Amino acid sequence: MTFLVILKRFEVWLLLAIVAALVAFAFQPGPSPEDPTAPAGGPVTAVVIPDKPTKEDPAAPPEEASVLSLGAVKVEPSGGGWIVETTLAGRSPTGSDLVLDESSVTAANDRGEPVARFFEPFRGSAALAGGEDSMATLRWWLPRPAESLRLDVGGASLAVDLP
């Protein structure tokens, strides 16, 4: 039983306590979205905007032959700012395949300030097909809250109302 001599060392007991605490922390469940003790940023809010104006809205603009529409908008707080995820649906406004990178897509907030893309190092650029309907998701970084965004995609402009 000479191997039990190692249990007399303080460092061994400290190491065992740290490992037990890390294992307990790793298996602890996260807060649920309905939990009132959720972080101060609140849960993620998703807003679905209809593609066509409704009959109940008399101020809706007349229906245009738009090839690009806004599918959904999600806003989630993140470390001192907000990540805005927009889903575009439809065909490319240019008529040919359009890669949605910094040269073809720009955004500005309601104050006219440019909005930067959210940096995702391992995600490739999204694209819209020119001949058929497709979907693309773009993520934007807002350091301050805004009421709306204006997206310019290949010459077409889309208004995005934020929740």
Image (cartoon, rainbow, N blue to C red):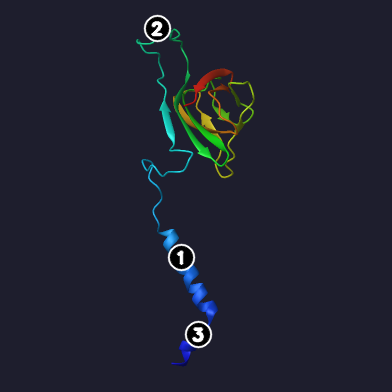
Residue 128's disc number: none
Identify which residue is drawn at 56% across, 39% down. Answer: 124
Label 3 vs 1, first from the N-terminus: 3
Label 2 vs 3, first from the N-terminus: 3
Gap in angstroms between the C-alphas marked 2 and 1? 60 Å
The residue beneath circle 2 is 58
Quadrant of the frame with the N terminus:
bottom left
Q: Position of residue 100 (x, y in %)?
A: 57, 30
The residue beneath circle 3 is 8
Residue type marked 2: Pro
Secondary element type, mark 3 = helix
Identify which residue is drawn at 53% across, 35% down. Answer: 83
Secondary element type, mark 1 = helix
Density class for disc 3 (Cα within 10 Å; few <14, some 14-19, many ≥20) is: few
Which residue occupies the foreground of this view, 155 or 2? 2
Gap in angstroms between the C-alphas marked 3 and 1? 21 Å
Label 2 vs 1, first from the N-terminus: 1
Q: Position of residue 86 (x, y in %)?
A: 49, 29
Direction bottom: furthest residue: 1
Residue type marked 3: Lys
Residue type marked 1: Ala
Apparent side of residue 35 relative to residue 130 in the rendered image (left or right): left
Circle count:
3
Apparent side of residue 19 relative to residue 115 in the rendered image (left or right): left
Identify which residue is drawn at 37% across, 43% down. Answer: 35
Residue 140, compared with residue 52, is above or below; it is below
Residue 21's disc number: 1
